[in-house]
Amino acid sequence: MAARAYDLRKLGQPVVAGFSTHSDRDHVLWHANFGDAPRYGTARCAASIHELLSHADWKGRIAVGLPPEYAEEIPMDLLGLITGLPAEAAQFPWDGRRS
């Protein structure tokens, strides 16, 4: 994730939003260098990750599914901070350019 954030910054491409299609741990991760862009997911995805984060031992539960060589590098405090979109949503909120 740090490498992706670096590459985007090098290209001058800011992260303006994130979207998680499902709650697998690698799809709800984030890195501080991506900035504080809004992050969205399906309602089901958001509910699932928020339920997981409600457990006191959530970091341990997530660590089990992460490659051990990367576990220390992953900023867990930013994991799963997503807003669920209503089931009928056809797109996520966007104030940017449409092409």
Image (cartoon, grey):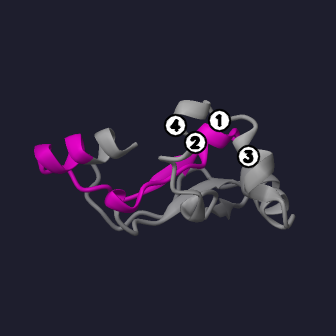
Image coords of residue 27 (percent x, y): 59, 41
Q: Are marks 3 and 1 in contact (CB under 8 Å)?
A: yes
Q: At label 3, which amino acid type do we have? A: Ile
Q: Earlier in the sequence, mark 4 or mark 3?
A: 3
Label 2: element kind: helix
Q: Nearer the viewer, mark 3 or mark 2?
A: 2
Q: At label 1, which amino acid type do we have? A: Leu
Q: Earlier in the sequence, mark 3 or mark 2?
A: 3
* Extent of the magenta region: 6-34
Q: Are marks 4 and 2 in contact (CB under 8 Å)?
A: yes
Whole-angstrom CA distance, mark 3 to mark 2, is 9 Å
Rate crowding at label 4 as few (under 14), some (14 to 19) or many (20 or more) other CA atoms within 10 Å.
few
Drawn side of residue 15 relative to residue 11, left or right: right
Seen from the viewer's position, the closer of residues 84 and 4 is 4
Q: With respect to residue 50, does 30 lie above or below? A: above
The residue that label 1 is drawn on is: 66
Whole-angstrom CA distance, mark 4 to mark 3, is 12 Å
Queried whether the magenta region covers residue 24, the answer comes back as yes
The residue that label 3 is drawn on is: 62
Q: Are marks 1 and 4 in contact (CB under 8 Å)?
A: yes
